[in-house]
Amino acid sequence: MMRLSHDTLINKGQRVQVVRKKARGLSLDHAFPVDETKIHCSIVQWLEAVVPWAEVHHSPNGGKRSEVEAAKFKRMGTRAGRPDIEIGLPEGRTLFLEVKTQAGDLSKDQKDCIGRLKKLGFPVGVVRSIDEARSFLRTHGIETREAA
């Protein structure tokens, strides 16, 4: 079993993230600049490892698109502000995670979408690390394969 954890620190004026990977008794530390994509990918990897019965999904709503492609996606139901990660669980439960860096703020579209989802009864968390994602799952009674 692999356990991932993240710590953020300041190194020579630059915010970096230290990732500790423990596997087969070895501990490796890697430091790299904090980037939302890296945090997002590490959370998805962690979710797939510790909640393998869940359906973890990301809709690529962001990025640069042509006007024609953007209009097509909008007609197909793509909406601004949708949380980054959707977690489908047994018995029809669905949770959402919006991933941000330590300095990241929610956009107006994100605040609006999260508000609508919460009003519908969906749990939505804004997380900045695996540790925060772990806490969000625990708060909502989701057991993981991680050792206690």
Image: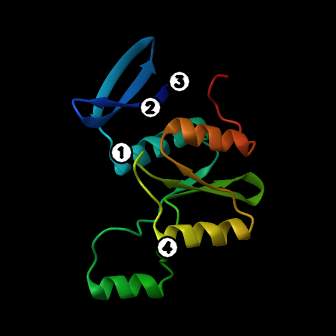
What's the residue type where badge 2 is placed? His
Q: Which residue is mark 3?
A: 1
Tell me: 91 left or right of 109. right
Q: What is the CA distance from the residue labelled 3 to the residue labelled 4?
A: 38 Å
Q: Give above or below for 72 relative to 125.
A: below
Closer to the chain start, of discs 3 and 2, is 3
Q: Residue 109, position in %: x, y?
A: 49, 73
Residue marked by disc 1:
38
Secondary structure beneath dot 3 equals: loop
Question: Do callouts 1 and 3 mark residues in contact (Cβ within 8 Å)?
Answer: no
Please give the residue where the numbered disc 2 appears in the rendered image: 6
Q: Nearer the viewer, mark 3 or mark 4?
A: 4
Residue closest to the far right: 91
Q: Who comes first in sequence, dot 3 or dot 4?
A: 3
Residue 19 position within the rendered picture, expressed as x and y whole percent measured from the top left: 38, 29
Q: Amino acid at mark 3?
A: Met
Mark 1 or 3: the one toward you: 1
